[in-house]
Amino acid sequence: MSQKAAVTVHRSREEVQRLWQDSEYRPPYIHGADAAVTFKDAPGDRGTEIHVDLERGGAGGKLGDLVRKVSGSEPLAKVKDDLRRFKQQVETGVIPRSDGSPEGELAERKLKQRPAQPLADADREKVGI
Amino acid sequence: MRANVWSGRNTVQVENVPDPKVLNDRDAIVRITSTAICGSDLHLYDGYVPTMKRGDILGHEFMGEVVETGRGVSNLSVGDRVVVPFPIACGDCWSCRHELYAACENSNPNAGLAEKAFGHSTAGIFGYSHLTGGYAGGQAEYARVPFADVGPIKIEDDLADEQVLFLSDIFPTGFMGAEFCEITGGEVIAVFGAGPVGLFAIASAVMLGAERVIAIDQYDYRLHMARNKAGATDLIDFSQDPDIVEQLKELTGGRGPDAVIDAVGMEAAHGHGALHAAERVKQAARSESDRGHALRDAILACRPGGIVSVIGVYGGLMDKFPSGAFMNKGLTLKTGQCHVQRYLRPLYERIKNGEIDPSFVITHRLPLGEAPNGYETFKHKQDECVKVVLKP
C-alpha cells in the first residue's frame, strides 16, 4: 500500500513553507514521524502542493506499528489528518468543527462519530473546545 | 432547545438537546424562525443515505435571527435577519474562490469518510449525514452556523419568511438546474419531478426564456401546480402512461427536448418492468443501489447533442446506466449540489422585484413539534402535500 499523501494549499510556496515551520501551524504528527516532505508549485493559480512520503522518511515500519498500537490509527491516516488541518488553518484561519467531529478532522473519530447535535458543556470540556 | 432528530429508519422525533455554542471565531448562532423539510431529507428518513446516526438533528433549509457571533464575523450583528445556505463554505479555498461553494475543500471535518465514498470530499452540509460533516441541522430552535461571514444573506426588507426561506436550497437548486440547460430562447425543456425542486426548475426555465417547459410527475395535484404556479406549458402524467420517452418524443415532433432536468434523484418511482423490480429488491436489501429510472429516461429522451441536468440527489451506485445512448447521442451531463452562495444575491433580487414569489410551493405549515407528522405527510404525498414549513 502506498505510504504517500498530498494536499494542495491555496497559498504561495514561500508562505506555505514558512508556515510549515511556524509553531502555530506545524503539523505535529508529520514532524514527529520524520517523513519526507516536498513542496511544489501547483499549476495555474492553484497554490502549493505538499507531498509527504512516509516510506522514504522511514516512518512506515516500527514507528508505524507503535502508532497503530497507541492510537488505533494508520500512520497514513494521521498524516492525512495533519495535511487537511494544516490546509484548513492556513486557508481559513480555523479548524472546522462539527457536532459529529468536534475536534475537527480526526482519524480516530471516523468510526466513532458523536450524533450531530450540540455538545453539552461537560462534553465540550472533555474534547477541549 | 428542542430539535427534530433522526432516530432510525422512517422515524424522527422532537427532543430536548443542548443549545449550540460558538466553537470557532467564524461561527454565528441563529435563532430559527422558519425551517422546512426537503425532498432530500426523505432520503435520510428512508435510510438510503449512509452514515446517519441516531440523534442527528435534521434540516438544511432554515432562516432566523442572529443571536451571537464569533470574533471573526464582522459582517453580521446580533438581531440581523438571515437566510442560511445549506452548503457550508469557507470562502477561501480554490473552489470557493471559483464560486464552487458546494465543493468547498475545508468545511467537511469528515473529509476522510467522504473521500472513501466519493473519491474526494465536498462541502459540509447542515443536517445531512456524517459523510457531509456531521453538522447539526436546522429543524431546531437554534443552529450554529460555521463560516457565518461567508454564507448567510441578510434580509433587510419586510419580505415574509416564506418568501425568502427557499433561498436556502430549493430555489437556487432549481435555478441552477435550469441554468445548466444553457437556455438562450426557443428551447424545449423537460423536467422530471414536479416536487419543490422540480417546480423551481420549471419556474426558472420559464424565467430564463425557454419556449416550452414540460413537467413530468405521477401526481395530478403537483402537475396542476406546475402548470398554474410554475408556468409549465405541457404535462406528462406517467400514472396514466408510463412510457415517458415516447410521450416526450411526441410532444417535440420526434426531436426530444433540448435539455432534460432530473429533479427526482435516487428514489425514482416511475420505473416499470423487470429492471424496476430488480432495483427495488437491491434497494430494500440496502446493497447501495440508487434507483435510476428518472436519469435513464432523461438520457433516452434528450435530443442528440442536448444537455442532461441532474439536480435530484443520488447517494450510492446505479445499475444500467445507458452509456451507449449517452455517448452516441453526444449528451452533456451537468450536475451537483447547488453552489447556493453564488445565487443568493441575484435570486433575492428577483424575489424583491416581484419576478417570483417562492412561497407558492408551500402546502403545509406546522409547529416544529409536529415534524414527525410533517415527514409522514410529505413522504406519502398525503393531503396533496408539496412543501412543509416548520415553525420552531
Image (cartoon, helix red, strand yellow):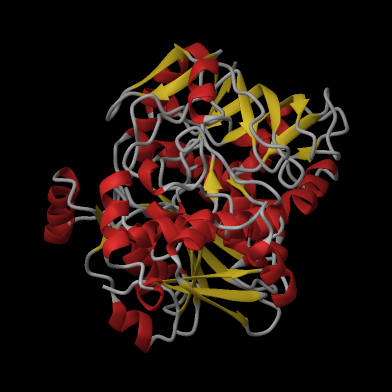
Q: Quadrant of the C terminus of chain B?
A: top right
Work out whether B72 lies above or below B382: below
Q: Nearer the viewer, residue B336 or B224?
A: B336
Identify the residue at image location x=18%, y=46%. B286
One can see residue A90 in this view: yes
Work out whether B200 lies above or below B161: below
Q: Nearer the viewer, residue B243 or B14?
A: B14
Left or right of residue B217: residue B89: right
Q: Position of residue B1 (x, y in %)?
A: 56, 12
Q: Nearer the viewer, residue B233 or B136?
A: B136
Work out whether B384 lies above or below A4: above
Identify the residue at image location x=59%, y=43%. B86
One can see residue B50 in this view: no
Left or right of residue B210: residue B235: left
Q: Position of residue B389 (x, y in %)?
A: 57, 25
Q: Nearer the viewer, residue A34 or B171?
A: A34
Work out whether B269 lies above or below B213: above
In this figure, what is the number of numbered marks? Answer: 0
Identify the residue at image location x=32%, y=48%. B267
> For residue B65, what is the image quadrant?
top right
Q: Position of residue B145 (x, y in %)?
A: 65, 35
Q: Position of residue A121 (x, y in %)?
A: 55, 17
